[in-house]
Amino acid sequence: MSADPTARFAVQDLALSRGGRRLLAGLDLELTPGEVALVTGANGTGKTTLLRTLAGLSEPAAGHVTLDGIPTYRIAAGLTAPIAFQGHTDGLKRDLTVEENLQFYAAVWQCNTAAGDVIAELELGDCAHRPVRYLSAGQRRRTALGCLQMRPATVWLLDEPLTNLDARGAELVERWLSAHMARGGCSVVATHRPEALAELASVIVEL
Amino acid sequence: MSADPTARFAVQDLALSRGGRRLLAGLDLELTPGEVALVTGANGTGKTTLLRTLAGLSEPAAGHVTLDGIPTYRIAAGLTAPIAFQGHTDGLKRDLTVEENLQFYAAVWQCNTAAGDVIAELELGDCAHRPVRYLSAGQRRRTALGCLQMRPATVWLLDEPLTNLDARGAELVERWLSAHMARGGCSVVATHRPEALAELASVIVEL
Amino acid sequence: MNAYVTLFARDLKLALRRWSEFATPLIFFVIIASLFPFALSPEAAVLNQAGTGVLWISALLSSLLALDGLFRTDVDDGSMEQLILSPTSLSLLVLAKLCAHWVVSSLPLIAIAPFIALSFYMPVDALATLIVALLLATPTLSVLAAIGAALTVSLKTGGALVGLLVLPLTSPILIFGTRATDMAMNGESAAGPLYLLAALAAFSLSLGPMTAAAALRVSVE
Amino acid sequence: MNAYVTLFARDLKLALRRWSEFATPLIFFVIIASLFPFALSPEAAVLNQAGTGVLWISALLSSLLALDGLFRTDVDDGSMEQLILSPTSLSLLVLAKLCAHWVVSSLPLIAIAPFIALSFYMPVDALATLIVALLLATPTLSVLAAIGAALTVSLKTGGALVGLLVLPLTSPILIFGTRATDMAMNGESAAGPLYLLAALAAFSLSLGPMTAAAALRVSVE
Amino acid sequence: MSRWRWFHLLASPPYVYRLAERLAPWIGAASVLALAAGTYGGLVLAPPDYLQGEGFRIIYVHVPSAYIGLMAYVVMASAAACGFIWRIKLAHAVAACTAPVGASFTFLALFTGAVWGKPMWGTYWQWGDARLVSELVLLFLYLGFMLLRSSFDERDKGDRVAAILAAVGVVNVPIIHYSVEWWSTLHQGATMMRLDGPSITLEMLIPLLIMIGAFTLCFAWLILRRLQAEILDRERRTRWVEQLVTGGAS
Ligand code: HEM
Ligand SMILES: Nc1ncnc2c1ncn2[C@@H]1O[C@H](COP(=O)(O)OP(=O)(O)OP(=O)(O)O)[C@@H](O)[C@H]1O
Ligand SMILES: Nc1ncnc2c1ncn2[C@@H]1O[C@H](COP(=O)(O)OP(=O)(O)OP(=O)(O)O)[C@@H](O)[C@H]1O
Ligand SMILES: [Mg+2]
Ligand SMILES: [Mg+2]
């Protein structure tokens, strides 16, 4: 399951539509290892839809999204899993503790990062054994982001990762993104606060 | 149901706890008509808990929250409703359209603001008749904030109102807050981006 | 009162938004009833005997099934907080939700019950009693289910136990209901069990919404 | 395989944390079973006839009832997206969830069934057949219900629509199940229907998870 | 090579629309003729049954509609499966417009059977009978398909999800059919519905066969017309439909 860290992520002539309405068309984008693309745009312009399509969760209306030449839609259909997606929802089980949630994802992705280390980095030490249901919104978001460390993924697709995070949380996201780039990964981040991540970005896609 | 626009909102020696842990103690705050208090603090320090207690949704561990001398906990128990609370969740029905959601709250609060005007102000014209389920995260948040205009409330309690909003959305919140203050209302806003609302704030509570 | 009507209308609208939603409890009822002959022997004598039971159990199930989500969606999406903070009393609002749910789930079922009863060879004279009994029993079932739903929503794990305690309370309703139907089928007067059902309905409708409202207030805290 | 075990364990753990949700169908089962004698005449002969039917219908309903939420919570909280993107095949993960659900909801029911059967005067010799038949039939019921749940997961309409989709498909199981039980009660060998149940279980377990996975993929889109 | 050309043509809505436009009148006319012939043969030429008297003539509606009801399900499920596997929107359209037609014929079979049952068995409905119950289950399968499809606001998604259901259903139809048959023979012996084997005369049989043919043609005509409507609805935003509509208006 070890993902190739130097993959090429390419978007060609992409068109998206929702409910019969065309959201965007003719989008081209190419990310080489170590690059971050920021996606910005007003509410409802299609950032989330774009990220889901890049992840291979939905099929584009036209065009292609490929990772090393393989369409991501087929990757999502179970070949291998080099793509990590973090959407508006957090993907956590309310009744499991922070630690259990992290361990679950580690097991599913067959990754041997220790949950304890990630929890320490997230500064969630005192709620590690508390069910997620009792966490504050920001603590939940941190846990969800922690799951990123549990996936050996080449491409990170993050939808407004800074939501509900305080200043230290935002710093953490920045640090993790740089580390991911340094490892040769690439990433697409949708955000309403491009200024907070502008230093890292190599491309800015304005929808 | 007409709310007194010039009420006095007072917090005396408030203490909060969750799950047996004391979150804060000895908080005093007094808001006169036209004042906005910003609540800031790291993730998990108790901003949401504070706002819910102010709204009267939960009882404080110690101390009092009063609006013109009446404890808000009793207000919430059904006497009258001069308090509007907007939390992390949006309180919208997924299967109703934007317009229907707004009209519902207008009817429950017996307020005769026209939904159409609010929708226009929210710039949601083209999704007014779309079920909320199909809106983007930001469009949903706007709709939720729109419900504020449907309640003749003196006190606005907003928990991170800027979440998921783009720049124009943030401006709108600012504009509405100023209008509310100009009407003689007061408000408490929890946020991780105090700089965006700093101009309006008369008090900043650092948790 | 205005808020009552609004919430009632909203819940009706939510239910009717898709016609499938309105039709499915009905079809569900028909299907359960038509599956029973598979499990029992399809002879008229046995079916006739079991018909009453089948009808009442199907009625119970279809009024309980949908009720689980009665408050959960409102609590999850934050509407419940808004309703609690609204100027109208929460008990009244709970009653509105209950009534809407009853109209959508129980009323069509009562309308179709006579046909099912006929297909189970119930005598025509007994139908009126069956309908009256269902009209009296279903509100109580709905109230009980609503209390269970409110407790389950509010007390997360521990309180669900209370929800479980509510379920067995439905058995008196079923017993009086089947009793009334059986008596009518035998040509006797079913007034006794019907009065009891009416008393239970009055009792539960007057106290139930308050109880559910109290449980909900805790849930949101 | 590792992911299979993990997901299985997680779902078991979640179920035990919310045990009341899973106990509900069981209580249902007991209530229905204890209530049926009221609807039938309490004579041994009639009860004996109806007992099989009641047992099977309750088994059917209780495996359908809880399954509605099998995927819904995962879809709502975004876990499903993560599972779809994971390196393990989705069919295998669906199978894991199914197995966990079966252990939590069907197994206790099978454990309690003999006691209910005895209370309906079923002969002791027939109990072994009853248990085997339930063991063979419940997996197919769960698979069918899971497919129904996957098809409707992105709809607000919950249990009722699933019922409509799935109940007609379950009639063979009911027929073979009751047939096996009846044959055993008459002292005949029930091998025939049991083999058919086993064949259906093998068939549905091999194709069902794939089908449910395909439905989930479309739904989450 | 040419086989693939056909495949592509059949997946092209305008082509299929025009093809249906050309075929429908012929099939419709043929169906009317056959219906007339079958009705005349069945109601006038065929002699009354020696057991059931004139009442047996309902068979000329009952059996054909029962047969169409079953066949339509197979048509619907195959179309839906093609649509799902090869992602042909048109195949989904075929499935979508077959469902109500099939459900109607199934209902007709149930209804005529019930009406027939009253004089023959003394009751409209008999839970114990295999055919009756499996026909009812078939009706539920249709209703499930239609309800599921219409529950999605995005037609695309509804098509694909319902296709899965149709495929599961088609696997189950034979299982249901046979299991029900075995079940009822266990409890009450042979069913009452049986043409009396060799005793049926040619005069009765031939009109029946003609009626079956006529119903099939009628079914085909209904499907073609409904398919045209469905295509127009699905393609209402395309240029060719616009031209078709404005061209027709001017
Ligand atoms: C609601 C009641 C009824 C239903 C649902 C029903 C259904 C069916 C079905 C599904 C078929 C099979 C057609 C085929 O195999 O292609 C059939 C055939 C037939 N039915 Fe009925 N039926 C009903 C009542 C009756 C009654 C009351 C009679 C007459 C006494 C009757 C006489 C026949 C005959 C003669 C056939 C042709 C049998 C054959 O060719 O094998 N049906 N019916
Ligand atoms: N049942 C509980 N048991 C223990 N701790 C709890 C419980 N419920 C909440 N908490 C804790 O209470 C604290 C306050 O949460 P609250 O949601 O008020 O924080 P917040 O300031 O709004 O944070 P954020 O900025 O992340 O939204 C959190 O640290 C949370 O973990
Ligand atoms: N079924 C549908 N019918 C019509 N429009 C739809 C449907 N589903 C989504 N949309 C629209 O598609 C657009 C794209 O939504 P998306 O969630 O991708 O936006 P976004 O850029 O992420 O916005 P935000 O910044 O608010 O998160 C929105 O305008 C939404 O209203
Ligand atoms: Mg978005
Ligand atoms: Mg908070």
Image: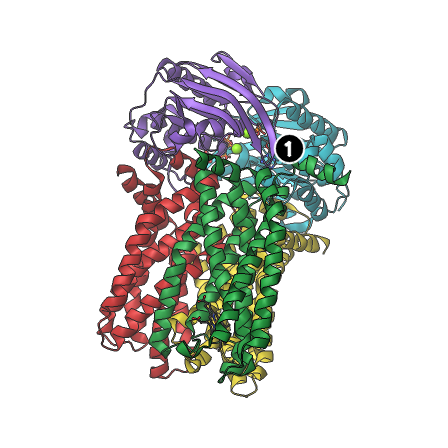
Chain colours: A purple, B cyan, C yellow, D red, E green
Q: Chain of mark 1?
A: B
Which SS class for mark 1?
A: helix
Of residues D60 and D180, which is closer to you in this image?
A: D180
Q: Would you call the spot at circle 1 few (<14 residues within 10 Å), some (14-19), or many (20 or more)? A: many
Identify whether E184 is placed above or below C217: below
Identify whether C58 is placed above or below B34: below
Name the image quarter holding residue D53: bottom left
Q: Position of residue B51 (x, y in %)?
A: 58, 36
Name the image quarter holding residue E43: bottom right
At horizontal 53% and vertical 15% (from top left) the residue drawn is A204
Of residues E238 and B33, which is closer to you in this image?
A: E238
Q: Position of residue C56 (x, y in %)?
A: 49, 72
Q: In the rendered image, is residue E20 in sight?
A: yes
At horizontal 37% and vertical 38% (from top left) the residue drawn is A97
Q: Position of residue D218 (x, y in %)?
A: 46, 40
Identify whether B44 is placed above or below E39: above
Q: In the rendered image, is residue E11 in sight?
A: no
Of residues C4 and B95, which is closer to you in this image?
A: B95
At horizontal 43% and vertical 36% (from top left) the residue drawn is D81
Looking at the image, residue D32 sits to the left or right of residue E236; the answer is left
Identify whether E170 is placed above or below E203: above
Q: Position of residue E50 (x, y in %)?
A: 49, 85
Of residues E57 and D208, which is closer to you in this image?
A: E57
Q: Amino acid at mark 1?
A: Arg
Q: Which residue lies under the disc numbered 1? A: B142
Which of the four quarters of the rendered structure image does ligand 3 lie in?
Answer: top right
